[in-house]
Each structure stands twice: as C-alpha cells, then as structure tokens.
Image: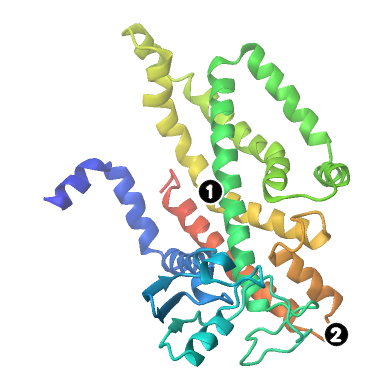
C-alpha cells in the first residue's frame, strides 16, 4: 500500500531520474560521506566537549540528572559560591569524597573548541588526537565545530540565495518590463564592484564580523547567478504555446507560473544546489583564511588553515587536519552534484 502511494506521489520521470542517480557509485559514496560528516558536525557536542554528556548526582536529596554538554548550568544550581563556571570534574571528586556514588558519561574527545590548555602547539597524541594550535586549543574540537559553522553557512547561503534568485528571476523573465531593466542594471553594478573590497570595507567599519553579517555580505552577490539562470529559463518557457493556451482558457498568470513554468524551470537550477553549497563553504573558508571572515575565537576551517600556513615548518598537523577535512567535505558534495547533473540531464 505504501509503495503504491509513493509511486503515485512522484512522477515516472522523477523516479527514473532518481534511479539513475542512485545507480551511480559516486552518488552513493558522496551521500554516505557527506551524511557522515554532516552528522558529526551537527552533533559536535556529543563527540567533543569538556563537560560530561550525562551527569548523575546521587546526594542526600536524591538522584539528579544533568546534561552539561548540551545545557548550560549556573554555579548556583550546584551550590558553588566562589566560581562563575562549574568544574564538573571537581564536582564529581567532591561528591566521591563525600561518599556519594555520582557518575558521568564523557564525550569521546574531552575538549571543546574554546578551552586553552598549557599544551601549546602539541603534536597529535592520545590526549589531543590532532594536536593543539598556537593557543593550546584542541584541533579536533575546533575542526568539528568549524565544520558545523561552514556547513550551516553554506546551507543558509544556498537557501537564501536560491529563494531570492528564483523569485527575482521568475519576475524578470515573466513580466519583463521596467522591473527586468532595473534588476539587470543592479546586477551590472554588483558585478563591477570587487567582492573582497566590500568585505574589507565593512570589516573596517564594524571592526569585526559576526556570522550573520558575513552571510549578509556574501548574499548580496550570491543571488545574481541564480537569478540570471532562472530568468533565461522563464524567458524561454513563457514563449511556448501552453502559456497562451492557459490564458485563453481563463487561467491566471499565477497558475501559469506555479503550475507550468516553475516545475520545468527549477529542474536545471536544482542540479546546481550541491555546487552552490560547496561554493558557500569555500567562500567562508577563504574569508577566514585571509582574516576577513568570522571574528575570533569562532572555530573555523579557514582560521586553522591560516595557522597551518604560519606554522608549516614546526606544526604540520595544523595544515593537514583542516585540509583533509575540507577536501572530504567538498569532494563529497561535488560527487553528489556530478551525479545529480547526469541523472537530471534532459538528454538522458
């Protein structure tokens, strides 16, 4: 029954294209690799954090459960008066000394990306799997959290630029006229302004950039390519006979756009999705590498690469770790993109 519903929900053409997609080895490898990296990055607190995942305190008042890696607790909640931050290792020791059988489940890697240790520029070891950076911070932790920042940036940039580009491109291609003229002039203006100059100017004005500001600056330029491609698709489709036929039968422009034009125009645009995500990740990495991206101490692949460049002679792990992670991430996304391009090729 469920199989019949699935078959009736998706068109035969879409099912055929998905079969072509999954038959490709690079598609399966790319999806598996990207999914693994995505899950690791988005659940970074589970794998790497200085605080326990689960703390079970057995005291005179009963058994209490805490999740310090996922929830922030104040020192007052544990009756600590002489500190602002809770040291859970010390808290466990105090409970054990008092005869309480408290226990905790720790993440695999016992560091978070912001903790500075005395082990500055330490090579990979059992304590720090990928070594430490120039401030003694654990590279494994910074890489996991930095990968999450990069993936979030790439996905948000793709979603916003595609939404804006598709809406503007459809309005340009279908209604043409003065709106199309103004937007085309705006695109020409944006194309002659150097992107890096805008980043440097804004960086100098606000004295540092946050995630939202960096995303907004990149978004000012990212929608242009999507809009131009969507405009070209809609201009070609609106000249087809079906548009005049729908109008003659009493249909509206809204029906033409959403029922006939968008389903046909979006297919070639959607095949660009993986490449747009990888381009967003690459853009943030380059900005962080040059020092014009996210403000310190935000964990970042580009920031680790910059450290690797500065200390390449005596701390090669600072370069190898982020390079390998970035390569795996971009290769997996591009493998998915190539497989999608072949599967959705109209000539196939």
**Horizontal side, residue 102 vs residue 3: left or right:** right
The image's mark for residue 248 is: none
Marks 1 and 2 close (CB-CB < 8 Å): no
Location of mark 1 (residue)? 273
Q: Quadrant of residue 313?
A: bottom right
**Horizontal side, residue 23 vs residue 315: left or right:** left
Among numbered discs 1 and 2, the one appearing first in the sequence: 1
Where residue 145 appears, x then y in whole percent? 61, 67
Badge 2 marks a residue whose secondary structure is: loop
Where residue 67 appears, x then y in whole percent? 46, 70
- Residue 331 visible in the picture: no
Mark 1 neighbour density, 10 Å: few (under 14) some (14–19) many (20 or more)? many
Where residue 232 appears, x then y in whole percent? 58, 29
**Looking at this view, is 290 or 298 the one in front?**
298
The structure's colour scheme is rainbow
Q: Residue at x 55, y 21 (%)?
A: 171
- Residue 345 visible in the picture: yes
- Please state the total of marks drawn on the protein image: 2
Q: Residue at x 45, y 40 (%)?
A: 267
Q: Quadrant of residue 255?
A: top left
> Foreground mark, 1 or 2?
2
Where residue 347 appears, x then y in whole percent? 43, 45
Badge 1 marks a residue whose secondary structure is: helix
**Looking at this view, is 252 or 94 the one in front?**
94
Location of mark 2 (residue)? 313
Residue 309 to residue 154: above or below: below
Residue 269 to residue 188: above or below: below
Q: CA distance from mark 1 to mark 2?
A: 38 Å
**Horizontal side, residue 39 vs residue 10: left or right:** right
């Amino acid at each position: 029954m469920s199989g019949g519903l699935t078959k009736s929900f998706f068109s035969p053409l879409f099912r055929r294209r998905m079969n072509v997609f999954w038959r490709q080895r690079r598609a399966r490898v790319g999806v598996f690799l990207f999914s693994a990296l995505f899950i690791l990055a988005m659940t970074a607190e589970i794998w790497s954090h200085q605080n326990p995942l689960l703390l079970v305190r057995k005291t005179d008042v009963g058994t209490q459960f805490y999740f310090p890696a996922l929830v922030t607790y104040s020192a007052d909640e544990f009756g600590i008066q002489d500190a602002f931050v809770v040291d859970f290792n010390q808290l466990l020791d105090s409970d054990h000394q008092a005869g309480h059988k408290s226990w905790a489940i720790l993440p695999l890697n016992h560091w978070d990306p912001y903790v500075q240790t005395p082990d500055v520029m330490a090579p990979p070891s059992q304590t720090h799997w990928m070594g430490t950076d120039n401030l003694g911070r654990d590279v494994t932790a910074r890489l996991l959290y930095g990968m999450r920042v990069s993936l979030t940036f790439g996905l948000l940039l793709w979603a916003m630029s595609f939404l804006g580009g598709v809406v503007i491109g459809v309005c340009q291609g279908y209604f043409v006229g003065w709106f199309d003229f103004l937007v085309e002039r705006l695109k020409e203006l944006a194309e002659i302004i150097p992107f890096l100059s805008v980043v440097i100017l804004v960086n100098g004005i606000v004295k540092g950039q946050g995630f939202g500001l960096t995303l907004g600056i990149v978004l000012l330029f990212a929608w242009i390519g999507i809009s131009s491609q969507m405009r070209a698709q809609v201009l070609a489709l609106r000249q087809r006979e079906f548009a005049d036929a729908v109008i003659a039968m009493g249909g509206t422009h809204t029906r033409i756009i959403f029922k006939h034009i968008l389903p046909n125009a979006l297919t070639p645009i959607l095949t660009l999705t993986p490449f747009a995500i990888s381009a967003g990740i690459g853009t943030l990495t380059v900005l962080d590498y040059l020092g014009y991206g996210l403000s310190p101490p935000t964990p970042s692949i580009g920031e680790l690469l910059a450290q690797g460049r500065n200390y390449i002679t005596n701390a090669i792990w600072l370069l190898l770790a982020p390079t390998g992670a970035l390569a795996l991430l971009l290769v997996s996304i591009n493998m998915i993109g190539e497989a999608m391009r072949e599967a959705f090729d109209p000539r196939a």
